[in-house]
């Protein structure tokens, strides 16, 4: 008997939020509210978002009962037919083929042998099934605001009394002397705050950090050089002035005042000084590079931006993690890598709006095929 299992899956997804295919995986339908696309001028009706997980394979009996009742066969026959269908799908997926379930979606295996699901545009919500997107256009209104708009007097409430005060009559002009009014005092000019204060502050901070790094490196180099000079001086004094009773005497006081180092000691001292200078130069270069990177980060990071880390996948094998890291690097992402409970591979970026994080997640899903991308830092 030829039974169309994908047709049963499509029918049951309209009636149930979860549907398990025994021995294969589970489809989950999540309700999504209506959305408005202001750029395209459309409003999409409510729908259900369909996802697939191969971790839950326990039979819930929904698909088996529907096949058994529809075709009038026993439960064991229904399970056998579904098992044959699952075995056929597994064979196609193992051969790197794409399994298509009509009106439901497509299934395939990625480079780490995990089953990925790409849903179709079918709306599995019975309440809004068949509703097309609505078109709309914004209404533009012109609004003029008067600069010197007088506020009308308040309207008295019913039954209330308003007390009016009458101004006293002015005195006669002959008896009152009006003093000369002083000239108006000009208001002090307050310059508007510059908008570039934040950028100037960031530049000044970067220059200060760079100066501190260079000063610290120079002080470290000078300190190490002084220590080496003191050690050489102490060694020279011990060679020139032997301890009393050791059996060594100086031939002449003039030679003792000006000791001469032997050639091996001179070469050893020069090599130690060269190694110390090299270490100091490397330390200065590292601090300078760190300060420059901090300055560049301060300049390139937009004002008010926050750092976000998206983990694409946590892999067990180092080879798979390296391939994913190389792919993200070739696409121009700032790769995030951490060895913790496996190998966490993701990207790092700065954002100012939540929509930018969602766009990055969609881009990574289309690029890698991974649907379970999680936010580690936000």
Image (tube, rainbow, N blue to C red):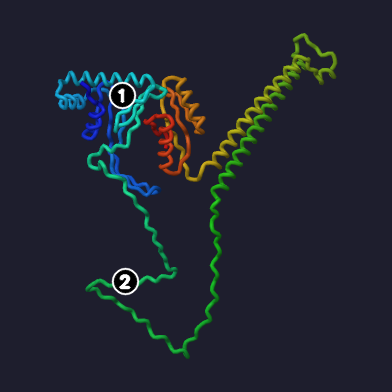
Say above or below: 120 vs 83. Answer: below
Q: Which residue is mark 2?
A: 154
Q: Is residue 109 left or right of residue 319?
A: left
Residue shown at the point (32%, 20%) measured from the top left = 90
Mark 1 highlights which residue? Answer: 55
Label 2 crowd bin: few (<14), some (14–19), many (20+), radius 10 Å: few
The image position of residue 331, as x and y in percent, is: 50, 32
Viewer-side residue, 76 vs 257: 76
Q: Is residue 124 left or right of residue 287?
A: left
Front-most of residues 86 and 220: 86
Cβ–Cβ under 8 Å for marks 1 and 2: no
Q: Circle 1 sits in a helix, a strand or a loop, which is it?
A: loop
Image coordinates of residue 168 in percent, x first then y, are: 38, 83
Counting residues from the start of the chain, the first of labels 1 and 2 encountered is 1
Position of residue 93 in the picture relative to residue 58 (left or right): right
The count of marks equals 2
Q: Quadrant of the N terminus?
A: top left
């Amino acid at each position: 008997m030829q039974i169309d299992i994908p047709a049963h899956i499509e029918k049951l997804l309209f009636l149930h939020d979860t549907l398990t295919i025994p021995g294969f995986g589970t489809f989950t339908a999540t309700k999504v509210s209506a959305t408005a696309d202001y750029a395209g001028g459309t409003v999409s009706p409510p729908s259900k978002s369909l996802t697939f997980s191969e971790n839950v394979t326990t039979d819930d009996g929904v698909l088996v009962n529907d096949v058994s009742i529809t075709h009038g066969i026993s439960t064991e026959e229904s399970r056998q037919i579904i098992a044959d269908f699952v075995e056929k799908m597994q064979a196609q997926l193992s051969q790197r083929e794409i399994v298509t379930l009509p009106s439901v979606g497509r299934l395939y295996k990625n480079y780490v042998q995990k089953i990925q699901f790409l849903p179709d545009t079918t709306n599995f919500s019975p309440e809004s099934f068949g509703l097309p997107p609505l078109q709309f256009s914004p209404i533009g209104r012109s609004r003029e605001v008067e600069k010197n708009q007088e506020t009308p007097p308040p309207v008295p409430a019913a039954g209330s009394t308003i007390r009016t005060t009458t101004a006293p009559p002015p005195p006669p002009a002959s008896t009152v002397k009006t003093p000369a009014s002083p000239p108006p005092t000009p208001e002090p000019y307050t310059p508007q705050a510059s908008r570039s204060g934040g950028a100037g502050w960031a530049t000044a901070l970067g220059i200060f950090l760079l100066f501190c790094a260079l000063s610290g490196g120079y002080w470290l180099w000078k300190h190490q050089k002084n220590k080496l000079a003191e050690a050489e001086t102490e060694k020279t004094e011990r060679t020139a002035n032997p301890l009393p009773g050791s059996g060594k005497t100086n031939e002449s006081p003039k030679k003792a005042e000006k000791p001469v180092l032997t050639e091996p000691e001179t070469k050893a001292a020069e090599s130690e000084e060269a190694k110390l200078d090299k270490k100091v130069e490397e330390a200065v270069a590292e601090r300078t590079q760190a300060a420059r990177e901090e300055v560049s980060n301060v300049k390139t990071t937009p004002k008010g931006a926050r750092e976000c880390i998206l983990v694409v996948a946590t892999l067990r094998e180092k080879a798979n993690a390296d391939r994913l890291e190389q792919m993200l690097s070739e696409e121009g992402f700032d790769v995030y890598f951490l060895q913790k409970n496996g190998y966490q591979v993701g990207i790092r970026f700065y954002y100012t709006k939540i929509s930018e994080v969602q766009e990055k997640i969609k881009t990574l899903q289309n690029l890698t095929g991974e649907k379970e991308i999680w936010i580690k830092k936000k």
